[in-house]
Image (cartoon, rainbow, N blue to C red):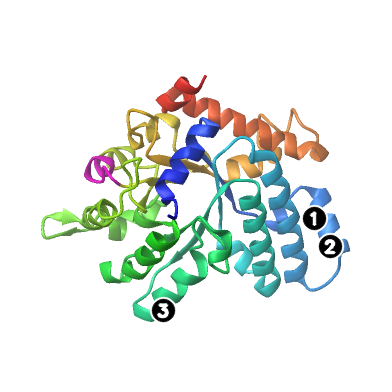
Amino acid sequence: MTQHYADRLAGAITVKGTPALVGLDPRFDSLPEPIRLRAIDGGGSECEIRARGFEEFCLRIIDVVSPLVPAVKPQVAFFEECGPAGMSALWRVIRAARERGLIVIADAKRGDIGSTAEGYARAWLAGADIDAAPWGADALTVNAYMGVDTLEPFITQANARGAGIYVLARTSNPGSAHFQSRMTEGESLYSAVARAVQQCASESLGECGYGAVGAVVGATYPAELAELRAAMPSVPLLVPGYGSQGGTSADVAAAFRADGQGAVINSSRGIIFAHSRAGYKERFAPEHWEQAVEAATLDMIADLRTHATPLDKEAD
């Protein structure tokens, strides 16, 4: 029997003792100089150069963080921008992360009707067996704007393969309220989405008590995060907005169950570009950028342990 996604994720969180999630969001101009120079020296088109740099950068980050965190989240857009070379690099990055034992959440925000949604689901959602889908991801972010029926093909594949999906509910960007907080029939749009997601999750529960259907809820709106956790007790949460976007460990505390399970907290720029951040660039020379990544990851883990997650305290 295929192991349930939420159970696999909960197990990984327990083993690593943290819900910290590292986002792989490479930007070429922000890469460490040695990687940029090697990518340029390799020749080829601009897209090929950027993709080469992204791949080396992400593979080396995976080497650093794989002993420390349960999961990574590649942002598909940055690879897709580089065309075929970028997507080939993404494929190798996903496989490398999975081979190192990491849960991979592909941040692609797919969503469509009927056979198109089925195609996206079959392409991305490998679940427990990396070879079950071309892209090999454990989970995928999806957009439910076109209706609950657009989620069904993703849920079907998730259940069959031990995969997961994360539905956009209340995102961390400043303009999210323009649509997501609009009132319809006495409730906000994000509340209506949450109600539907909770129903879907309750129909696909793992032993850990969470479903294969999760939700994206930003750390930058802590009151609404608490509201949505209460409305979605069976839903695993993916929480962006921690760190560079302003969210704190106190802001994400409401995402967790009493045992410290129920959410993964994403940090991207704050970790992968730590070598250029105050507090790290003074401590680590440019050629030691990986040590800055490790330090920033450990700082995030410690921050979450202190302020948000009983799980971590029990793990000590």
Residue linked to disc 3? 116
> Where are the magenta residues, as a range?
227-234
Q: CA distance from mark 3 to mark 2?
A: 37 Å
Q: What numbered label is drawn on residue 99?
A: none
Between circles 3 and 2, the one closer to the viewer is 3
Residue 223: give x, y in percent of width and height.
28, 38
Residue with the mark numbered 1: 36
Q: CA distance from mark 2 to mark 1?
A: 6 Å
- How far, Cα to Cα, is label 1 from label 3? 37 Å
Predominant SS along the magenta part: helix
Specify the amino acid type for callout 2.
Ile
- Whether residue 30 appears in this view of the structure is no
- Amino acid type assigned to the residue bearing label 1 in the image: Arg
Q: Which element type, helix, strand or loop, lies under badge 1?
A: helix
Which residue matches tag 2? 40
Q: Earlier in the sequence, mark 3 or mark 2?
A: 2
Tag count in the figure? 3
Residue displayed at 40% across by 41% down: 263
